[in-house]
Image (cartoon, helix red, strand yellow):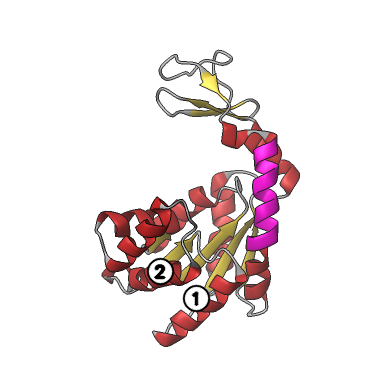
Amino acid sequence: MRLLIMGAPGAGKGTQAALIKEEYKIAHISTGDMFRAAIKNQTPTGIEAKGYIDKGQLVPDSTTIKLVKERLMEEDCKNGFLLDGFPRNTAQAEALDEMLKEVGIKLDAVVNVDVADEFLIDRITGRRTCLACGASFHVTSKKPLKEGICDICGAELVQRKDDCEETIKSRLQVYHGQTAPVIEYFSKQGIVKNIPGVGDINEIFANIKKALGDL
């Protein structure tokens, strides 16, 4: 099975991606992990990407696409894959289609974990993180036993800068402007599965499995 997972920041696609990987025994291809591995292994494309990153520049689409193509040719992708974090815009989506045509494969489905912005803002701004051990809590859905104190190590809980309302609104604006059109692009191919992303994690995953059941 060859899949792409999408969702706005905080939609929970990372959690669902891990469940999909385990259920279908396919490679989970996260753009961030892919870049880090290529740079660490000093592949030609990894070295090329590092050159841009070291200069504080965005890695161009052409380099990212080469990296994705290299990754899809690896042995663990023969049984299928789950792309996560790519494509981020319609130009990358078109390039992905061309790349897959070249190697004679196609996407089976795009899983879109769909959550309204208002819910995402509430979900993310309510997060509290322990800087000592990394444990995560929430002011309403996962309260610590003692307010502001980590249950695990007793250190102070804080709201990360990335989790403040101004930052998440900015990230959502970027998502809707650049990444959401990718969903529209693949919708025209009839392969998008829109999955409501609010509720119990296992119920959301059950809906994903149901949507993928006819593939």
Say which residue appears at 54% left-offset and 74% top-offset: 214
Residue 101 vertical placement versus 55 (above, below) = below
The residue lying toward the viewer, choosing from 116 and 92, is 92
Q: Hey, which residue is sitting farthest front in the picture?
A: 55
How crowded pointer 1 is (Cα within 10 Å; few <14, some 14-19, many 20+) is rated as some
Q: CA distance from mark 2 to mark 1?
A: 9 Å
Q: Quadrant of residue 186?
A: bottom right
Residue 103 percent location from the top left of the image: 39, 84
Q: Quadrant of residue 35?
A: bottom left
Whether residue 57 is visible: yes
Tag 2 secondary structure? helix
Where's the N terminus, which quadrant?
A: bottom left
**Residue that carries the numbered disc 1 in the rendered image:** 96
Residue range highlighted in magenta: 166-178
The tag on residue 201 is none
Q: Hey, which residue is sitting farthest left in the picture?
A: 41
Say which residue appears at 31% left-offset and 61% top-offset: 47
Per the image, is 147 magenta?
no
Tag 1 secondary structure? helix
Residue 45 percent location from the top left of the image: 33, 67
Say which residue appears at 54% left-offset and 71% top-offset: 92
Magenta: main secondary structure equals: helix
Per the image, is 176 magenta?
yes
Q: Hey, which residue is sitting farthest right in the picture?
A: 118
The residue lying toward the viewer, choosing from 111 and 52, is 52
Say which residue appears at 63% left-offset and 52% top-offset: 8
Q: Amino acid at mark 2?
A: Val
The tag on residue 68 is 2
Q: Are marks 2 and 1 in contact (CB under 8 Å)?
A: yes
